[in-house]
Amino acid sequence: MIKELKYVFYLIIIFFFIFFISRYYFSDEYKKKSYRSLNLVDDKINNFSENLVILESDTNNIIEYVEYQKDNNKNKYHFWELIK
């Protein structure tokens, strides 16, 4: 008997928990708060992006090109001759 009452009590608690949670999340008050918070985040992002400092580029003419000279005096290695 006590075991069945315990299960009923657990079911009632679970039911009320789900009921109150769903009631809160589907309420108009929660929708207003969530919408306001999303707008605040967007405003904060816009304000932050407007106040960013833009650095000037200091990488102009930084690459130095070197002329390539082909060296014709390289030793030519022949693999089969080295083995012999």
Image (cartoon, grey):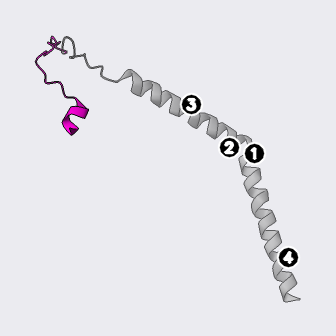
The circle drawn on residue 30 is 2
Relative side of 15 to 41, left or right: right
Identify which amino acid the numbered label 3 is placed on.
Asn
Relative side of 28 to 61, left or right: right
Label 1, on which residue? 26
For discs 4 and 2, the disc positioned in front in the rendered view: 4
Please say if 44 is above or below 58: below
Image quadrant in which you'd find residue 84: top left
Tell me residue 39's x, y (percent): 56, 30
Q: Label 2 to label 3, Cα distance in Å?
A: 14 Å
Q: Which of pointers 4 and 3 lies earlier in the amino acid sequence?
A: 4
Identify which amino acid the numbered label 1 is placed on.
Phe
Let me know if residue 72 is in the magenta part. yes
Q: Label 1 to label 2, Cα distance in Å?
A: 7 Å
The circle drawn on residue 39 is 3
Image quadrant in which you'd find residue 56: top left
Hey, which residue is sitting farthest bottom in the picture? 1
Identify which amino acid the numbered label 2 is placed on.
Tyr
Q: In the image, which residues are magenta?
A: 63-84
Hey, which residue is sitting farthest front in the picture? 84
Label 1: few (<14), some or many (≥20) within 10 Å?
few
Tell me residue 47's x, y (percent): 42, 25
For the residue pair 50 and 20, the one nearer the viewer reads as 50
The circle drawn on residue 1 is none
Q: How many marks?
A: 4
Q: Residue at x 30, y 19 (%)?
A: 54
SS category of the residue bearing label 2: helix
